Amino acid sequence: MRFPTAQWSQVWRVVGQQLSHLPGARRRFFLALALLTLGAAANIMIPLQLGKIVDEVIAAGEPAQGLFAALGSIAGGLIAAAVAAAAFSAAGFYVLSRMTERIIANLREEMVGTALSLPAHRVEEAGSGDLVSRSTDDVAELSSAVTETVPVLASSAFAIVTTAVALVAMDWRFLLVVACAVPVYALAARNYLKAAPQRYANERAAMADRARRVLEAIRGRHTVRAYRMEPLMHERIREASSTVVKHGYHARRTMMVLQLWLTTVELLMLTTGLIIGYLVVQSGALSVGAVTAAMLMLIRLRGPLMGLMRVLDTIQSGYASLARIVGVVADPPLPTPASGAPAPGGRARMDDVSFRYDDKGWAVKDLSLDINPGQTVALVGASGAGKTTVAALLAGMRVPDSGEVTVDGVRVSALSDAERIARLAMISQDVYVFSGTLREDLALARPGASDEEMI
């Protein structure tokens, strides 16, 4: 029972909540939008200035009187446009990146907080590997995706939009370039988005399963060695890794098909642009320099389009990670209310309890047990007999498939956290030590203890 993967609506609902909790998010967003728009507009001025150079050279004729003065003025405009484009774009990326990184940090904190409040049996059922993978691999993948894609995505989108607007403003017939390219883009995007999200989600799920296999082998290394299970564990990890490779190949194949579509669109745009450019020059509507600027704009679109294509792979992987993270925090568990249990007495009962793991046969079958206050009970049996399962059921870390487990006459699963802590303590043979000093670890039991009390 893995943790769920969030749906599109859940993802946007959680992201919207994070934005609403971020001070000044709306103001920052519109500031970033304005800066990126100014940067894209300044970037469009570069091919326009280059087109003016062509017109000046043609108009100068022989001898080229005043050409160098005109070219000097245009060169100054080119430098100013380049500096402005770089400055505005950098400022926009800075504002946008600060906002997105803050959202990721808040989302990471919320996920950890939610994970810590999950019922123990829920984490056990899902497997710690799934939760560890989401809180480490998926958070790292999302952070990397945002860092890599936000600048490229923003610059590409603004460059494409401003180029289209500039072309139409020069001559309405250049609208045909957009009209020819948009349907092909829409078809390519439709085919890609139809297959890519599920393939990337499958890849992330396979990576979580691989992490679980590796964690099982490392944490249970003493048992693995004692029973000479090394070949079996190696084979399981190999199978899990092969599954990751298979799903990764399917995801990358989708990307290669998209690249073929984009190459086709690029050829179509340049061909249409050349034909329209010839017609508008012949009709006298535009000069050769203006058409040169228009073609330079179309050629310069190759960079944003290829950049957009490169980051789509990262975007899909990042979204798959985001959906897995939101799957944990979208519907956090409600705290169990107080059951009204009597004062702690120390009596535990198991009545006809049965439990099994994933339809693999009964781990515990029709077990009844009555432990009175003050009694010490030892469970003895061979490995796999169910001793740990009985302890987990008594501690509330597992919920029985049938039967009832009670402490002080109340079902363990109905106890609130405070009631459970007052009655149950589980001490494992493998004691976890937090990073830090020995005093910090011991102080978990009594923060104000003196050194003498600890000794």
Image (cartoon, rainbow, N blue to C red):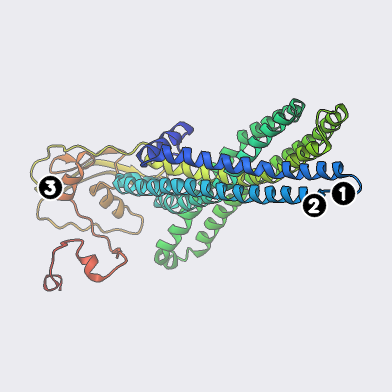
Closest to the observer, 294 or 230: 294
The spot of residue 338 in percent (x, y) is: 16, 38
Q: Residue at x 83, y 35 (%)?
A: 274
Q: Amino acid at mark 3?
A: Arg
Q: Amino acid at mark 1?
A: Ala
Q: Which residue is mark 1?
A: 64
Q: Which residue is mark 3?
A: 347
Closest to the observer, 235 or 301: 301
- The quadrant of the picture occupied by the N terminus is top left
Foreground tag (3 vs 1):
1
Number of residues whose C-alpha sits closer than 10 Å to that of mark 3, classed few (under 14), some (14–19) or many (20 or more): some
Q: Residue at x 23, y 59 (%)?
A: 427
The spot of residue 410 in percent (x, y) is: 16, 39
Q: Amino acid at mark 2?
A: Phe
State how far apart marks 2 and 3 are (Cα): 99 Å
In the figure, residue 302 lies in which quadrant?
A: top right
Q: Are the two marked residues, 2 and 3, in contact with CB atoms closer than 8 angstroms?
A: no
Local SS, label 1: loop
State how far apart marks 1 and 2 are (Cα): 8 Å
Local SS, label 3: loop
- The quadrant of the picture occupied by the C terminus is bottom left
Closest to the observer, 5 or 88: 88
Q: Residue at x 23, y 49 (%)?
A: 395
Which disc is residue 68 wearing?
Answer: 2
Q: Is residue 339 above or below residue 285?
A: below
Number of residues whose C-alpha sits closer than 10 Å to that of mark 1, classed few (under 14), some (14–19) or many (20 or more): few
The spot of residue 194 in percent (x, y) is: 61, 33
Q: Are the two marked residues, 1 and 2, in contact with CB atoms closer than 8 angstroms?
A: yes
Closest to the observer, 55 or 418: 55
State how far apart marks 3 and 1 are (Cα): 105 Å
Q: Are the two marked residues, 3 and 1, in contact with CB atoms closer than 8 angstroms?
A: no
